[in-house]
Image (cartoon, helix red, strand yellow):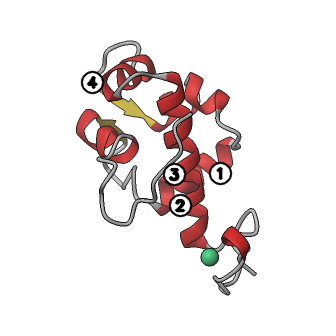
Amino acid sequence: MCQYKGASCRRKDYKRKLCKDHFVKYVRTLLRKTIRALYLGAEKAFGAIDHTGLGYVTQDAFLQSYVAQRVPLTSEEINEYFFLENVYKDGDRSLIYDKFKNLFFPHLTMAGDEPEKKI
Ligand SMILES: [Zn+2]
């Protein structure tokens, strides 16, 4: 059963003792924290991951990035997250800057987003 923050969620667990929704939330939060701890802003982070200047980030490029090395998640978990969040849909194999920014540097007051501790 899902163990998200003390267990008010009773859904079936999917990964890491979390249900699908909470797994997505957990991975998203970890990725955001890691990216924000490493880079000063969305542009710097995007530029570092897209270091060859393609203008987009492929899933492979993300998985080979410093962020993926530093985040306490496996490549499988990151892939799973991208899949569940529909980040890389069929025929859309790259992450452009705007989407990247929305994903990892949303406005802090965005609905449904929990306040996060500054690292
Ligand atoms: Zn849950």
Question: Which residue corresponds to mark 3?
Answer: 28
Residue 63, image quadrant: top right
Nearest to the observer: residue 36 or residue 19: 36
Spatial distance from mark 1 to mark 4, Cα to Cα? 25 Å
| 92 w.r.t. 61: above or below | below
The tag earlier along the polypeptide, 1 or 4, is: 4
Single out the mark in the foreground, 4 or 3: 3
Question: Which residue corresponds to mark 1?
Answer: 77
Can you give x and y, in whole percent of width and height, for residue 44 in the image?
A: 36, 19
CB atoms of marks 2 and 3 within 8 Å: yes
The tag earlier along the polypeptide, 1 or 3, is: 3
> Which amino acid type is shown beneath numbered disc 2?
Lys
Question: Which residue corresponds to mark 4?
Answer: 55
Residue 81, image quadrant: bottom right
Tell me the residue at 49%/52% (across/down).
82
Counting other residues with Cα less than 10 Å from the Cα at mark 4, is it few (<14), some (14-19), or many (20 or more)?
some
Counting other residues with Cα less than 10 Å from the Cα at mark 2, is it few (<14), some (14-19), or many (20 or more)?
some
Can you give x and y, in whole percent of width and height, for residue 15 in the image?
A: 71, 65
